[in-house]
Structures are given as structure tokens and as C-alpha cells.
Image: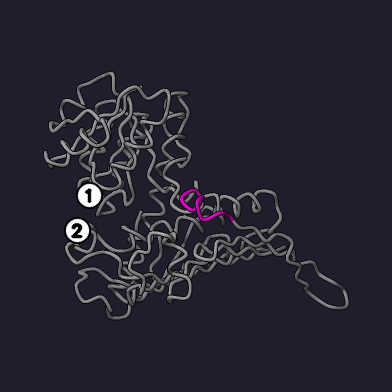
Amino acid sequence: MKVAVLGVGGMGGGIIKTLQKIPSVTEVFAYDVDTERVREREQSLGATGVTELERILENRDIPLVFVTAANFAHKELTIASLEAGKAVMCEKPMALTLEDARAMVETAERLGTFFQVGFELRYSKLYTKVMEWIEEGLLGEVINTTCLYTSSAWRKSASWRLKAAPGGSMMGEKLSHYVDLPRWWVGSEVTECYAACAPNMVPYMEIHDNYHLTYKFASGAVSHLTYLQGHPATFRGDPLQPAEAQQIGDGHELRYIVVGTKGAAECDVFLRAIKRWDCPMDPEEGLLSNLVENLTWDPSEGHFYFHNTTDQTIDIVRRVEAGEPPATPARDAYNSMRLCFAADVSVDENRIVQLSELE
């Protein structure tokens, strides 16, 4: 199979490296509007460089494309590729407006074409373990989730991801991952949300650097996300330690607590911990709690327990080859994006937003 990567910056370059290790992938095309970047990917990664999009779209020997360009280009590249008969994986956020995201989904549904959005945390061994416990009934019905994510201001001021026009909001660019996971775990649609943002700490960001979001599901479950992009990390990139280990005790945290009717789970990226509690009811003592699983992983395996783009890429290639549907349906991903846009409406208008307002 020949595969094209549209937009070959940092994310696209990583996808190219993974694709080249898949035995069934015979050639990888690297497309970008930046000719110097294309040339560099040719030289450093051995990809076939292309600077004219039509060469990709018109090549019937390329059945699959990965859209990893800047956020503002997602809609145009995705729809053009779908219309050309390609299977598409598009990085999140789907688009900068809900209307554009809807157009992408409707195009794929109209054509019956494979279209998956890059919510690679659904491939994380950390978060899939939680899903495994849920599917086995060990947690019961999930009724509460909370996520605390405090991170450093790690992007430099020139990054397009900090600008409103090319990148969109922090909800879509980054936090879409962290509302998509509870939707996956709860298995119900969100009905309403309320979000608030404090003034920015990071002075050069054009978008909000913090969100406090509460959202309710049709099942009655409630989820909360607190995200703070605050003080920078004190470390300066010690090459002898993984990035996650360097941030422990430095004011940074990425932790979920998932509470069900029969038990609870906790997963912590920086502490490399996955825990599960069983919560039986004793007639005399009341509700009890037993720590029944306490798991960890080697630091060298960190990629597979966090943003596991490797297994996502491998799985997408396999699915397209086998004629299977996406692991995450495009409409499902769209509903995660609806929540992101609803959160921004809530911030802007200082009110509870019903998801039915954003169909």
C-alpha cells in the first residue's frame, strides 16, 4: 500500500517514521506547502516529496492519506481527499468551526468513505486499561469522572498553536482529547456543559490557557475537567530522564479519577500509575474500598501509555487494507468536537449551554 501524509511538520514526520516500519506500506509520500520541509523529509526520512496536492489526489495507487497539517487546513485537505476516493485520518481538531467539522463528516457519510479523527488517547494502554475494566463490569456504571491537568507553558511564543486564526481554541487543539475520553468511558452523549476561564498566565497566548469545564450526560453521569497551563517547568531537558519523570513534583499533573457504581479507577501519566478499587457494600460497615489492582509501566514504554500515535497509525493501515470501518466513527469524533465548541460558547456567554443548541 502507498500512503500519503499531508502536512509534514512534527506530527507528520512522526507518522512517516511509523508508516515506513509497516511491512505492507511500500511507499510514503510527503506533501507540504513548505518546499524546504518537503526536501528535508525526503533526505532525512526517505519519503517521496510532493509539493502539488493534485499529484496525491489524482494518484489512484494511494488509497490512504493522513492529514497532519495545521488546524486551519484540515477541512480543505480532508474533503478534497475524501472526494478523491481516499481513506482519511485527520488529526484533531477536525476543523476550526463546527460547520466545517460537520461538512467533513457529512462528506464521508455521503461517500461511504473511511474517515477517522486522531483521538489517539483511545489507543493509550493507560486509558484502554480503564475501558477494559468498564467493559468487564468491574467499575459498574460510570457516574463521575474528573481530570486535573496542570502543564507547563511549553510552546514557544511563535507557535501557530497559540494563535487563534491558524490553531483555533485550546479546547479543540488540546483539550478535545480529555473530553473525548470520558465520552468513551461513560458511553452516553453529553446534554449540557458549563465552562469558565480565568485570565491568562501566559502573556503571549492569543487563546485561553486554562479551562474549568463541567458537563452532564444523558445517563446522569457528570464529568469535570480542570486544565491549567501555568508556570514553566524548572527542568531544562535533562537527556537522561524522560520528560514525564522530570515534571514530577514540579507543579504538573495529569490524572483522571473514574467512579462507577461498583468501583473506581485512577490513572496518572506523570506517576506512571493505574489503580482500581473494588467497592463492596457491607451490611454493618457500609461501603468498603479494596485496592485490587495497582499497575505501572517502564519509562521506556511511555509513548504507548500516552499519545500512542504508533498503534493508531498501524491500526488505521490495517483497517483500510481489510476494508474495516474506523475504530472511532467520524460522527462520534464530531460529537466530541461539539462539546469543545459548546464549552467555548459557555465561556464567551457565561452560561450553561445545551448541546442540542449545536447540532
* Residue at x 19% of width, y 58% of height: 160
Q: Who's the residue at 34% across and 62% down the image?
A: 171
Tag count in the figure?
2
Q: Secondary structure at mark 1?
A: loop
Residue 43: horizontal and vertical position, in percent?
20, 34
The region drawn magenta spans: 297-304
* 233 horizontally vs 275: left or right: left
- Which of disc 2 and disc 1 is earlier in sequence? 1
Outermost residue on the top side: it is: 61
Quarter assignment of residue 338: bottom left
Q: Which residue is mark 1?
A: 70
Kindly identify the amino acid type of the residue bearing the numbered disc 2.
Answer: Trp
Seen at 11% across and 38% down, the residue is 35
Q: Contact (CB < 8 A) between labels 1 and 2?
A: yes
Q: At which x and y percent is residue 315?
A: 47, 35
**Is 189 inside the magenta-drawn segment?**
no
Between 102 and 309, the one nearer to me in the picture: 309
Label 2 sits on a secondary structure element that is: helix
Mark sitting on residue 167? none
Front residue of this view, candidates 234 and 160: 234
Instruction: Give the answer, above or below, for where 240 lies relative to 43.
Output: below
283 above or below 277? below
Label 1 CA crowd tier, 10 Å (few <14, some 14–19, many 20+)? many
Q: Is residue 196 above or below residue 344?
A: below
Residue farthest along the front direction in this orientation: 240
Q: Main secondary structure of the magenta part?
A: helix
Task: Give the image location of residue 117, x and y in percent.
Answer: 37, 44
- Residue linked to disc 2: 160
Q: Percent position (x, y) of residue 305?
A: 51, 52
